Image (cartoon, rainbow, N blue to C red):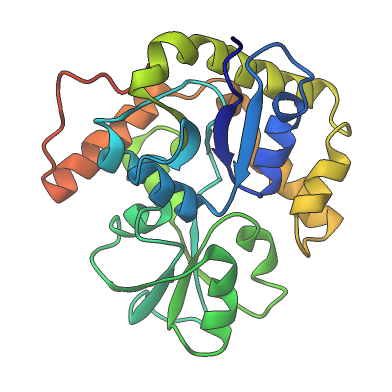
Amino acid sequence: MARPAVDFGFSSCPNDTFAFHALVHGLVPGPAVAPFIDDVEALNARAEAGGAEVTKISIAAYARVRDRYALLRSGGAAGYGVGPIIVARGARAVGGRIAIPGERTTAALLLRLLGPFETVPMRFDQIEGAVLEGQADCGVLIHEGRFTYEAKGLTLLADLGQVWEERMHCPLPLAAIAVRRDLAATLASSIDAALKASVEYAFAHPHASDAYVAAHAQEMSPDVVRRHIELYVNQYTVALDERAVNTMIEWQAHTFKLAAPAALPIFA
């Protein structure tokens, strides 16, 4: 009997729909997948609850699920110049009530590079409005917020990716694809190869996914969609920088005094 389609969670953001279009639509060899599409923080929570077989997950959220999930090398998000940014209504010091795109996100973890703050979790696409309306003093923007904040009248206070790069001397690892450990022996190799093939297909056929990307891009302009894909889909989407991932996990463990399960490897 054929295995049921693999439950595969990823976000509706253009980088994911562009990168995984070929896999979802059976255009590359590999297991059939049943997509589960949601905000990255919702994906983090779903993995923490054990509801995903294969899923995109924030690197910062991985410590919560390391006992049950291993990371794959393809399909992740990392790079230089890709980090979250902190904005406000005008020039000011970072502080006050800071809106973050979820407590489990890498963006929330990176804020600790600047110190502990009072944070207000909310969906990533609500943060610009919350800052503009005074519901938060500052906001940590991810995804397309990097391209839209100026037009909305917000002021850049800090680039957390730049802070990371200067301190850690490596690319910033934002997210990875995780596979449930009980499935890793039979699934990890094939799904990792399929993810890599899907990203490579996207590079080779950059317009094949246009309709799929647009269908999930909400009200994003074509220019923002293009810039989003060009920034976040890169060589590290084909193969994550394992040293950068290890650096973040070790820094997180040191910052929060987490005990890592040494017997469990990070990567499948």
Q: Nearer the viewer, residue 173 or 22?
A: 22
Q: Nearer the viewer, residue 225 or 33?
A: 33
> Which image quadrant for residue 32?
top right
Residue 239 horizontal side relative to residue 158, left or right: right
Q: Nearer the viewer, residue 34 or 153?
A: 34
Residue 166: in sight, yes or no? Answer: no
Q: Quadrant of the N terminus?
A: top right
Residue 142 horizontal side relative to residue 171, left or right: right
x 64%, y 27%: residue: 33
Residue 191: in sight, yes or no? Answer: yes
Q: Is residue 28 above or below residue 156?
A: above
> Which image quadrant for residue 235?
top right
Q: Is residue 196 above or below residue 120?
A: above
Q: Quadrant of the C terminus?
A: top left
Residue 128 horizontal side relative to residue 136, left or right: right
Residue 260: x and y in percent read: 15, 32
**Residue extending furthest toward the bottom:** 134
Residue 178: x and y in percent read: 43, 30
Q: Is residue 81 above or below residue 185?
A: below
x 48%, y 20%: residue: 73
Q: Is residue 258 above or below residue 176?
A: below
x 48%, y 14%: residue: 187
Residue 52: x and y in percent read: 45, 37
Residue 236: x and y in percent read: 55, 27
